[in-house]
Amino acid sequence: MTRKLQPCGTRAAYVRHLYNNQDPCDACKAANVQHAANSPSGTNRYEYEATVALNANPPVITWRRKNNGVWVATSVHDPHAETGAQRAWEERMAREEAALAAMEEQAREVAARFEQHRADNTPLMTSARREI
C-alpha cells in the first residue's frame, strides 16, 4: 500500500516532480522557495524544528561578571529544557561557583601571608639558602 500523494503546492509535490523528471509547476516552485527560506541550509529536519522552536520561545540567561573578569551564568530559564536536566545544570553551576569562591579565598589567604612575610622583613627559608 502506498501513501497518498501530496497535492501540488507542497514541497513533497515539488520533489515528486523532480523525481519523475518533470518541470515543477508554479505552485510547487513557490512551495520550494518558501521551504528554502524557512529552513537553514545544511541542516536536517530535527535541527530545523529545534531552531524554529528556540526562535519562537528563546531561553533567558542572566549573566554576572565576577571580580576576576569571568562571566558566569547565574540563572537560566529554558522553557524547552527538561526539569531534571535544568536542575542538574543548576546544581553543577552552584558547585562550580562554590569551588571558584574557595579558590579565590585560598588565593587571598596566600596573598595575605605573603604580605605579612614582607612586612616582617624576614628572609625566605629555602633548601638552597638557609640562615645560620
Image (cartoon, grey):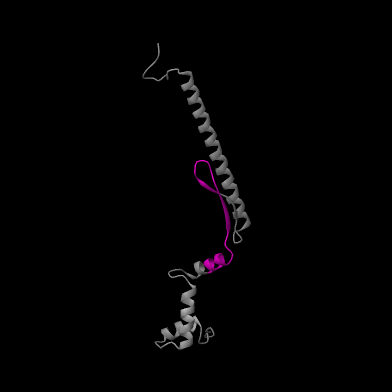
| Residue 86 pos. (x, y %) | 60, 54
Q: Residue at x 55, y 64 (%)?
A: 54
User: Going 45% across and 84% down the picture, which residue do you hit?
Assistant: 29
The magenta region covers 49-72
Residue found 50% across the figure and 70% down from its top = 45
Point out residue 59 in the picture as x, y percentages from the top left corner.
58, 59
Assess whether residue 61 is covered by the magenta stretch.
Answer: yes
Residue 19, how many percent across, how many down?
42, 84
| Image point (37%, 17%), residue name | 129
In the picture as drawn, the residue positioned furthest to the front comes out as: 119
Is 108 left, or right, of 77 in this rendering? Answer: left
Relative to residue 99, is residue 26 depicted above or below?
Answer: below
Q: Nearer the viewer, residue 91 or 113?
A: 113
Q: Nearer the viewer, residue 57 or 9?
A: 57
- Quarter holding the C terminus is top left
The answer to which quarter of the image holds residue 79 is bottom right
Tell me if residue 67 is in the magenta stretch: yes
Q: Position of residue 120 (x, y in %)?
A: 48, 18
Q: Residue furthest left?
A: 128
Where is 13 relative to 47, above or below? below
Q: Of all residues shown, which one is farthest toward the top?
A: 132
How many numbered discs?
A: 0
